[in-house]
Amino acid sequence: MKSFMFNQRPKKLLQLDQDYIPMILANIAFEKAVKESIDFVQVKIAIERSKGQIATQIAYIFSEKENQFDANYRYIERLVKTLLWLKGGWKVIYGGPKKLGIKLQSAYQIGGDREFDFTFMGNIYEKEFTFNVVELNEVPKTNEQSKPLGRHLDGYRIGFDAGGSDRKVSAVVNGEAIYSEEVVWHPKLQTNPQYIKDGVFDSVKRAASKMPRVDAIGVSSAGIFIDNRVAAASLFLKVPKELFDKEGRNMYLDIASKMGDIPIEVCNDGDVTALAGAMSLGENKVLGIAMGTSEAAGYVDELGNITGWLNELCFVPVDYNPNSIIDEWSLDAGCGVKYFSQDSVIKLAKKAKIEIDDNLSPAEKLKVVQKLLVENNALAKMIFETIGVYLGYTVAYYARFYDISNILVLGRVTSGEAGNIMIRVANNILKDEFNDLYQKINLILPDEKSRRVGQSIAAASLPKI
């Protein structure tokens, strides 16, 4: 058999990204070739996270007789990376061919290709990250539980959404937003956390001034939070670790204390996106995707609960092209952040040869392209059509891991006509190539008001008074 190549491009090549290789197309081709081969073999991968919860996945690869080691490695390595950032965890347990397991193990260590993942997960879960190679029958079974989230709207509440380009706040009285505000800021450029702390507190005080009292504060923010403490957040990207540990980790608890020790609940903005969708639709099985400074995601399951998964889809691979743009943080190619955020628009604008002042902030560069779209610029339209193609194929990939009925698409990148273009193109991809998913999944773009402030209103519902 010839060496299997991950080179399955869309039926219609993308003019602005001709080397794009959707994960779903390449995986389908790989799995078909494996099933048609001689004596294909099973691989089991388990990811363990906090409180002993385990997510286990089964896959099949070529046997050694087929001499497809490189293809097997590429397929399983991308699957492990997907599971790790989608589910989250501090331990990977691999059962399958030993040679493959040992090479994967070597990637997840200091100096390995996945050093970022190794270090990040260890810090988040406050355990030494391990990659264990075991016998197939020693891989543990799935053991997961979900839990309720939010939907409390009684009393006088503040909902705050900490974005990388703007911060949004709402004053909510018995479920009704009486005041909402957005303020542009640049937290990711700051080395001093005081700028960030002052900005958050300023928004909270503004919302508080609109109500006779404040009963609770709910926060939606990019990052990972444990017991309402900041475990990791891109807002503090340039803040030195020692300063972050000293002044950043307890930021939201400190604000709650300043406001009179009122209840506060801090959640990843992706989970709040999904919650906002579930609340507005009155339905569950919602995947929320927010396209802004990065790609944030969250999921509400069939019970209306959150899963405890990490849902950091910004680091989940969506493109097999090894020469695709590198994510500066994880140093990996083909990750979601470069396809579903303002970075994607900027990347594609360069390929379209749209001139944008390099001195502008990323959010300002996005606005330049969106202004061109309002002016019916064909290249600007092509940019958002390209992101729509990314979205269609990636939804089909995400559907392998999430049971989805509704996908709520939010974020600054979707503002104006851009969101409608992306949804239309993505739906066409699903209808033409994944019709079973097209029949099952609704891609939903909220109205402009909900799109811009819905996150902070849903955040207000997080704490129980």
Image (tube, helix red, strand yellow):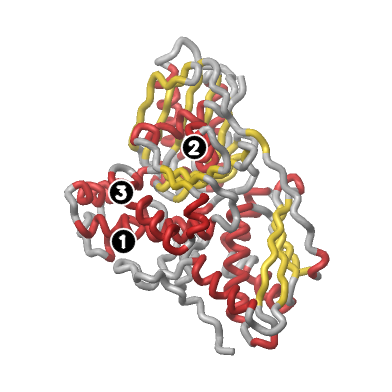
Between marks 2 and 1 in the image, the one whose residue lies nearer the viewer: 2
Kind of residue at badge 3: Ala
In the rendered image, is residue 206 in sight?
Answer: yes
> Which numbered disc, 2 or 1, marks the residue that appears first in the sequence?
2
Badge 2 density bin: few <14, some 14–19, many ≥20, Cα 10 Å: many
Place of residue 146 in the rendered image (x, y in percent of width and height, measured from the top left): 68, 41
Tell me the residue at 22%/56% (across/down): 356
Image spot of residue 28 (x, y percent): 55, 70
Q: Secondary structure at mark 3?
A: helix
* Left or right placement of residue 90 versus residue 364 in this view: right
Who comes first in sequence, dot 3 or dot 1? 1
> Judging from the image, what secondary structure is the residue with disc 2 in?
helix
**Residue at which label 3 appears:** 418
Q: Secondary structure at mark 1?
A: helix
Looking at the image, is 227 positioned above or below residue 325? above
Q: Along the line of sight, which residue is nearer the eye, 244 or 12?
A: 12
Q: Quadrant of the C terminus?
A: top right
Residue at left offset 25%, top offset 52%? 369
Residue type at numbered disc 2: Gly
Could you tell me residue 432's position as x and y percent?
A: 42, 62
3D distance between C-alphas at marks 2 and 1: 29 Å
Where is residue 9, by image quadrant? bottom left
Q: Which mark is residue 277?
A: 2
Q: Quadrant of residue 82?
A: bottom right
In the image: residue 294, left or right of residue 463: left
Residue nearest the viewer, comparing 352 with 25: 25
Residue 348, label in figure? 1
